[in-house]
Amino acid sequence: MPGTPPPPAGAEPARQRLDKWLWFTRVVKTRSLAARLVTEGHVRVNSVRVETASKAVKPGDVVTVALERHVRVLKVLAGGERRGPAPEAQTLYEDLAPRPSPSAGADAESDADEADG
């Protein structure tokens, strides 16, 4: 639109397409894969299943993505401007999914060692 000033340089968008955000955060390798995950029903925003890749997400939204081997639960902290390196991508979200404790794997190994001995 003529007469509309451009957004300030470095300003983060208030809202961003879900498929773009998933790609910028490196949850998926390609934007088309992100769109496919959404349309196939593997993505929820604030506990509601999303059916279109164009759904807008904003800071504060919680995005749940069911991937092949695990589920990611991410709180949107910001929209991205580009698909940058992983450390930059990690600034766009907070991971809310609990991580398995490293001691759980170690306990299983020590039990197996005791059974052998």
Image (tube, rainbow, N blue to C red):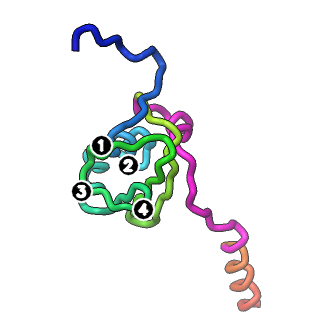
Q: Which mark is drawn over residue 47?
A: 4
Residue lying farthest to the front in this orientation:
3
| 90 in the magenta segment | yes
Q: Earlier in the sequence, mark 1 or mark 3?
A: 1
Which mark's residue is nearer the viewer, 3 or 4?
4
Q: Nearer the viewer, residue 84 or 66?
A: 66
Task: For mark 3, give the secondary structure.
Answer: helix
> Compared to 52, does 113 lie above or below?
below
Direction top: furthest residue: 3
* Dot 1 or dot 4, earlier in sequence: 1
Cα separation, mark 4 vs mark 2, equals 20 Å
Picture residue at 47% right of the left edge, 49% below the top: 61
Compared across the picture, whether 86 is left or right of 3 comes to right
Q: Quadrant of residue 90?
A: top right
What residue is shown with label 3? Answer: 39
Q: Amino acid at mark 3?
A: Thr
Q: Amino acid at mark 2?
A: Val
Distance CA(mark 2)–CA(mark 1): 7 Å
Segment colored magenta: 82-104
Label 3 vs 4, first from the N-terminus: 3
Query: Are the residues tagged 2 and 1 within 8 Å (C-beta)?
Result: yes
Indicate the amino acid at tag 4.
Answer: Ser
> Could you tell me how many numbered marks the image carries?
4
